[in-house]
Amino acid sequence: MTTMAWLIVGLIVLPVSFLTWSLVAVDRRGLAAVRTNLLRGFSSGAAGLQALNADTKSVTSLGVRVTPKGYAAWLDKLLDRAGRPTQLPLQRLLIVKPSLALLVASVGILIVSKNVTPPAVVYVVLASVLAYFTPDILIHGRGAERQKAIELELPNTLDQMLISVEAGLGFETAMARAAQNGKGPLAFELMRTLQDMQVGRSRRDAYLAFASRTDVPDLRTFVRAVVQADIYGIAIANVLRTQAKQMRVKRRQRAEEKAMKLPVKVLFPLMFCILPVLFIVIIGPAVINVMKNFVGAF
């Protein structure tokens, strides 16, 4: 494409991108709260707040309408695993995905409009589909990293809670102390679980929601053990001691498994990248000398 064509594309894409992001990226609930406080006592405040709420509902309903219900529930579960990032709630994600796909499709159509061929159309469609699912890939990766961090932190956190319980503290107090001393995603989830119980949610439901949000097998096992101990009246210190020991064993086993997989992962780079160069350096001069002698003999 020529410079003028790229300039035209930029003049179209950049304003559309800015308007889309300005529509999506605004924290409308926070803005509504600010406007409510600022307009309190004025007659026009209620009308402005109603208009803002109507705008927010219309944008949210648009994203919900273009997304299947099962897919939206799956995205909501991915956001739970990723820790519910404040910059990207579910309503905003449902609007960002089709907007991003539409933007990429528009740019692709502008690029291939002068030379429309079947491969070009396929590339535009594939690029649009990839743009639509790119937020899913990013959120899934963030959730996987968060799950790994929780698995690594869980044994140490259980040890801290065990020490607190043996010192005479209750289980929730020990959980709160571990959440205050920690800095990772597990500490955040513990604090959120305590907040759920403080607002009136039952202990069992809060623990099960804790395990469902994180979707970590080790943590799910620990939560089930705690729930059973609460039901049958088992001493929580014994449960914590047993679970902490099992989590340390599992963490060591996972490390050993990764160490065993390392030679297999290194095999293909070694065969295709390192060994050919090594053979050229070692055998190359001998092959050159043999060829010279062979040519000289004839």
Image (cartoon, rainbow, N blue to C red):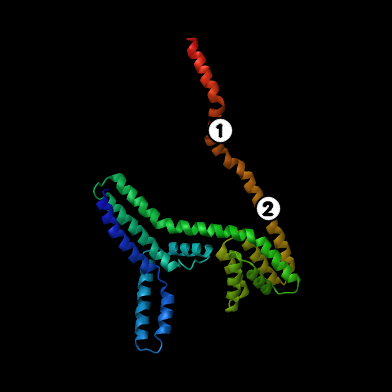
Percent position of residue 265, x then y: 57, 42
* Residue visible at 57% across and 27% down in the picture: 282
Percent position of residue 268, x then y: 55, 38
Q: Which residue is mark 2?
A: 252
Q: Is residue 33 above or below residue 232?
A: below
* Residue visible at 28% across and 55% down in the picture: 9
Check residue 229 in the rendering and tell me which mark sits there, or answer none.
Answer: none
Q: Is 55 on the left or on the right of 186, as rendered? A: left
Q: Which residue is mark 1?
A: 275
Percent position of residue 216, x then y: 59, 60
* Residue visible at 48% across and 65% down in the picture: 76
Foreground mark, 2 or 1, reads 1
In front of the other: 226 or 14: 14
- Quarter residue 42 falls in: bottom left
Percent position of residue 238, x then y: 74, 66
Crowd class of label 1 (few under 14; some 14 to 19; many from 20; radius 10 Å): few
